[in-house]
Amino acid sequence: MQILRKTELRAFERAKALGPDKVLEELEKSGLLGRGGAGFPTARKWRMARDSAASEKFVICNADEGEPGTFKDRLIITKNPEIIIEGILIAAYTIDAKRCFIYLRGEYEYLREGLQAKIDEIKNITQTEISIEIVRGAGAYICGDETAILNSIQDMRGEPRIKPPYPVDKGLYDCPSCINNVETLANVPLIIEGGWEDKRLFSISGDVREPGVHELPVGITARELVEPCQPKERIKALFFGCAGGCIPYKEEMIISKDTVAEQGAMLGSCTIIAVGESRRIPDVCKNIQEFFVHESCGKCNPCREGNYAMLGLLDNISNNIGSDAPDDSISTVEELAGFIKKCSLCGLGQASSTHITTALQHFREEFTK
Amino acid sequence: MTMIKINGTGYETKAGETILETCLRNNIDVPYLCYHPDMQKQTRCRICIVEVNGKIQTSCNTLATDGMDILTDTEEIKKLRRMNMELMLAGKDFSSYKGTRFAEVAESVGVTTSRFGKNSNKKIDEDSPALIRDNNKCILCGRCVQKCQNVQTVNAIGFTNRGHATEVTPYFNRSLNDVACVQCGQCSLVCPTGAIKEQDNITGVMQAIADPEKIVLVQTAPSIRAAIGETQGMEPGSLVTKKMVSALRKLGFDRVLDTDFSADLTIVEEGTELISRIRNNGVLPMMTSCCPGWIKFMEHFYPDFMPNVSTCKSPQQMFGALVKTYYAEKNNMDPSKIVSVSVMPCTAKKFEIRRPEMRDSGYADVDHVLTTRELGDMVKSRGIDFQGLDEQDFDPLMGQSTGAAAIFGATGGVMEAALRTAADILEGKELESIEYQAVRGMDGIKEAEVEIAGMKLKVAVAHGLGNARKLFEHIRKNPAEYHFIEIMCCPGGCSGGGGQPIPTTNEIIKKRNEALYREDQGLPFRKSHKNPEIIRLYDEYIGSANSEKAHHLLHTGYSKKNQF
């Protein structure tokens, strides 16, 4: 995997030799998009942060990998932490930040020591004035949202902020803050050093014998993604984490951001949970729904109360499958799902009903029979 | 000029104005719950959604920008709002919201029942003497938390748990009575559902009135006369002193007296104390002590300032101590039969009467405190046509007051009243210039330098505990800067008190305060020490200001309180 290549600070040295403007140019040329899920052009984000005249700026590495079925960042943190740190240093150098943070998922506490050792080692070698602090999350899903991370680092309740202002304008302690995913930052040294290919890390799990992280180009078929992981049974559906929704498994379908979006789902951070045909989709949805009820931060009414009410409806449907569940409960589910999507405050809340809308779009008969 | 289109009609917007604010200014109805004009936007409730250029957005936080095309009541918007309201009502009993902002919004949206939820059964927190919290009614709009944390910087309440289990609670899930809550009731003032409200004292008062053995006396705080009209359908800023007296008589109170009388008394005692501190190198700056919310705040968070705080009791408590002694004696009443009631703009007053120090008459100095809202409810439930009432005067002996007392209800009012008296005493003559404009108005912290008898007196006024905190931090670093400080717990002073009518906003508070300054200008006496009933009280009962008897009845002490 290229993401595990050891760049050994050569990229950081080259970045300094190039200067911030050339770094931004190279990044722009590469076309690197954010790997956290939203897919925002990294160079554009950095440029906005760089153009800000503020005296204090921050770089934050989002390592709060909380989406169920996603474990790609863990691989990098475990096997190539140097490249993340190097990416952070390049970001800090480019936007002119002195303080950086790695917001580490609460459950990744066991990775902290190793990561800290690498930070210290690199600090020793580079003697850079840029500091990197690890802040450990407390286990809340919402703290993967970039504005909730800001609150969490500031010792506030993990709730999303209203956007705008965006973090690049007014982020941590109201200073411009550049927040990038682990995988995004890990790609930066590869781009700056050269010989970079635009590949994604797919976290593939579910009804397969060999779940794991695979580095693959975007635009290959569903079969090419799933087969190497050795399905246990015939695969019926692919779920893109909990928030991304699902599509029916069609072997020759090209899996890309656009093709998945055409089916109403979101490829997001390339998380694929393969669901075998022995499972009932309403049960899978109920399971996902329990996750959202547990993880809704509680700030806005649609996500907090909507998801709770939705669980009750799904529970009912799941228990009554086969006994001619009344159709009006399905229409209530659809109404509620649409409401949650349109009215929730943050991206995570808005996405929390995608699994239901896509399941009803593609597997409706399973909910009624 | 910035123009936007709302429901097909063009409107001008002001810089920095949100869509909701433009709508409200033009009387276009958009429902809202978590929004409050004086606080940070939260977008928790999401009921204020509108369509902006085809996209659903919350109107409370979205700035109105040029060329926006806004629809406020499409079928889709109405449907989404109905679903939202159903979810807010999930597991709740609509009838428990009678008369609240929330009920009004629910009805306007067209939803009063819900398909969702099981009845919630959360424990009601009723241990505090001032406030009751019933989380079964709470819709988590967060206004109370905003007030407590950002405006008052008390942080007694906050959100705990997450998702559907989220609740607003005092820290460590304790009762409000067991945390550093100052009982100011600002939370209850902004709560749209009545989930946090004042402890009910109506029942106790009604029972006392119904008891033929009891003599029920009532005092009314300075700010009530400029606010009670709002509870009876009158415009903010209506000054209804004499109708209020009339209403209280109709409700069956045996004597209707005035806290303004004891506000004058406070000024004479406090002014004398200030002069004595200045002349005898006492602890300065001296700080006012009329406000029980600020006193409790000081005891929890700034106990190092205890020696700075005037030892004068608040006007309510001076009044209470006199009613069962001086007033009983002069009227041949048995003090054990007197029930002393006060009408206050304040919930902390309900706490204050239970402080162990407040029994100097040998009894509880004050037995019951009604908020402005509670009095309004009593008047309404009796079917009294308030606006049509005749105008009556307070009963004598403790019913007369001056303009200096009237302005106690506004931030800066106590300072101004004290300066009027202190200046006369120090100069040894009657001064004609008595208006101190620098300490008036809604600025959070106000400063003034006043020259009296060749001495430069530097004073400061803060209202709202967030501002008070800023001022204290400054004084800690510059202890010698000021001579005299006025602190009021609530924004705007007592006019913005936690027991005042809902809604209360800065705009409304300004109008109430203007009414108080009108009252001041219309009164024959405008300096506390000129109040004939105060002069009589000293002549016939107390002797002189700060005398031993005065100290026994009219002064008090403070004690450090823990935060945790």
Image (cartoon, helix red, strand yellow):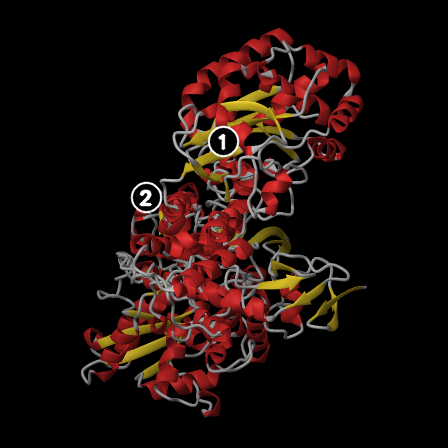
Vertical placement of B76 versus B27: above or below? above
Q: Secondary structure at mark 1?
A: loop
In the rendered image, residue A265, in percent from the top left (x then y), is placed at 55, 45
In the rendered image, residue B481, in percent from the top left (x then y), is placed at 58, 43
- Which residue was labeled with disc 2? B172
Q: Are marks 2 and 1 on the same chain?
A: no
Q: CA distance from mark 2 to mark 1?
A: 27 Å
In the rendered image, residue B165, in percent from the top left (x then y), is placed at 35, 50
Looking at the picture, tell me which residue is in the foreground, B508 or A103.
A103
Which image quarter: residue B205? Answer: bottom left
Vertical placement of A129 versus A326: above or below? above
How crowded pointer 1 is (Cα within 10 Å; few <14, some 14-19, many 20+) is rated as: many
In the rendered image, residue B10, in percent from the top left (x then y), is placed at 75, 71
Vertical placement of A6 versus B77: above or below? above
Q: Is residue B509 visible?
A: no
Q: Residue drawn 54% across and 57% down?
A: A343
Which image quarter: residue B65? Answer: bottom right
How crowded pointer 2 is (Cα within 10 Å; few <14, some 14-19, many 20+) is rated as: few
Q: Is residue A47 visible?
A: yes
Q: Nearer the viewer, mark 2 or mark 1?
A: 1
Evaluate if marks 2 and 1 touch, with contact meaning CB atoms under 8 Å apart: no
Q: Chain of mark 2?
A: B
Q: Residue drawn 47% across and 92% down?
A: B388
Q: Secondary structure at mark 2?
A: helix
Q: Chain of mark 1?
A: A
Looking at the picture, tell me which residue is in the foreground, A247 or A307.
A247
Asked if residue B368 lies left or right of residue B308, the reply is left
- Which residue was labeled with disc 1? A64
Looking at the picture, tell me which residue is in the foreground, B156 or A63.
A63
Amino acid type assigned to the residue bearing label 2 in the image: Phe
